[in-house]
Amino acid sequence: MSLYKDLSDKKEKLSLIGLGYVGMPIAVAFAEKVNVIGFDLNAEKIALYKKGIDPTNEVGDEAIKNTSVEFTADESRLKEAKFHIVAVPTPVNQDHTPDLSPVEGASEILGRNLVKGSIVVFESTVYPGVTEDVCVPILEKYSGLKCGTDFKVGYSPERINPGDKVHRLENIRKIVSGMDKESLEEIKNVYDLVIEAGTFPVSSIKTAEAIKVVENSQRDINIAFMNELAMVFDRMGIDTSEVVDGMNTKWNALGFRPGLVGGHCIGVDPYYFTYQAEKLGYHSQIILNGRIVNDGMGAFVGKAVIKQLVLAGKAPKNAKVAVLGLTFKENCPDTRNSKVNDIIAFLGEYGITPLVADPWASASDAKREYNIDLTDMSNIKDADCVVIAVAHNEFREMSLEDIDLLFKKCDNSEKVIIDVKSVVDKEKAEKLGYRYWRL
């Protein structure tokens, strides 16, 4: 009898290890088809899920209230499952080397509770070789079981885009791989239960691992090109957005725009790829340079703030600056690896401590990750400069009149608007005399 069949018949359970922006939606989706145990070390998060609260805003409170997922912080519950999906984060260290401690820790926990006949599928972003060379030995050590004989492994890279309500787990084609033909077939069949767009089997686990880091590296490089253009056009006095709008009229334009590249995927995955490449003696000529460009955009925007304040006749050190948005992208509460913090840090070098408001971000996350005290929008007034850093709907819907209320009463030529995401009507802002700059 296959594990897929036993799961479908609800004779066996599936576990999801790591219930964040990726893991929780997967658990909820599978719970509509099979019995699911959702495990996370964060007891506070588990308590919220049990109360029907979705702190990630990925599926919503109603879906959490109605799901049959058995949420738990008790690792021993993992013994009840035989199909395990590991979806923990894989960040980078300060020196940009991979930090595998979360996936290693998850492997240790799962190893202590692994039973014979299980299949373990990793979804965490890793460089090629981690599943088999790092995770499997840990699973074997803590379980006392032998991979290939007592349990099997596979890899299926997550492709969920936090905050995206269009491209969801169910309608994104899923890469699947297994250590052999039997495990690949089982893994494919299990994912086919919830992936409406279908699965795409590949020949090896390393291939699947490579696909994940390469697809995000490709996006990173393309955005880096646009960011480099933005820096050059700024010196030339050319509006980048107008150039891009014109370029995008051609049929084969790619549609990328300049911006802050943060978050837990595009801003991290290229480092995983180049790390392994360098271990094999190849030093990246393109990928790392793209990372350098993108990692420098926060400082570039920060310099624009200082320059525009000076041109407006303001002494930067005495200027009151407001930053709207802290999350790494719009309409999403995820603050991990947000490059808005780079803008704030740069301003700090000039003695500026801006007021930061974000209706989506968690105040506790902002304090813990960046030591930033978020404020309510109602507290922003008498500003000399307003930086619109994230294109939340709340900010897109603000009129110039609304934005003007954030400034101190003075001539519009002394009011600086820094529009990172081009949400303000440039023509109108300039016509009304604001000192307006956009990326």
Image (cartoon, rainbow, N blue to C red):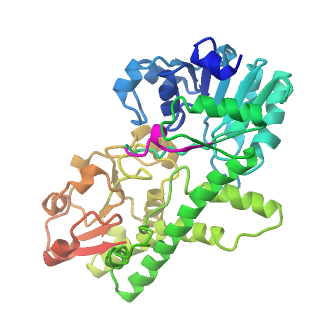
Left or right of 398? Residue 360 is right
**Quadrant position of the N terminus in the picture:** top right
User: Looking at this view, is 405 or 55 the one in front?
Assistant: 55
Compared with 81, 381 (above or below) is: below
Compared with 17, 357 (above or below) is: below
274 drawn magenta = no
Left or right of 9? Residue 313 is left
**Quadrant position of the C terminus in the picture:** bottom left
Give the residue drawn at x 43%, y 67%: 256
Q: Position of residue 46 (x, y in %)?
A: 50, 23
Give the residue drawn at x 45%, y 62%: 260
168 drawn magenta = yes
- The number of numbered badges drawn on the structure is 0
Residue 398 lies in what quarter of the image?
bottom left
Give the residue drawn at x 73%, y 32%: 183
Residue 293 lies in what quarter of the image?
bottom right
Compared with 107, 12 (above or below) is: above
User: Looking at this view, is 389 or 14 the one in front?
Assistant: 14
Give the residue drawn at x 48%, y 54%: 338
User: Looking at this view, is 334 or 207 the one in front?
Assistant: 207
Left or right of 377? Residue 263 is right
| Res. 204 in view | yes
Which stretch is magenta?
166-175
Q: Position of residue 99 (x, y in %)?
A: 69, 47
User: Looking at this view, is 411 or 255 the one in front?
Assistant: 255
Q: Position of residue 327 (x, y in %)?
A: 42, 50
| Res. 106 in view | no
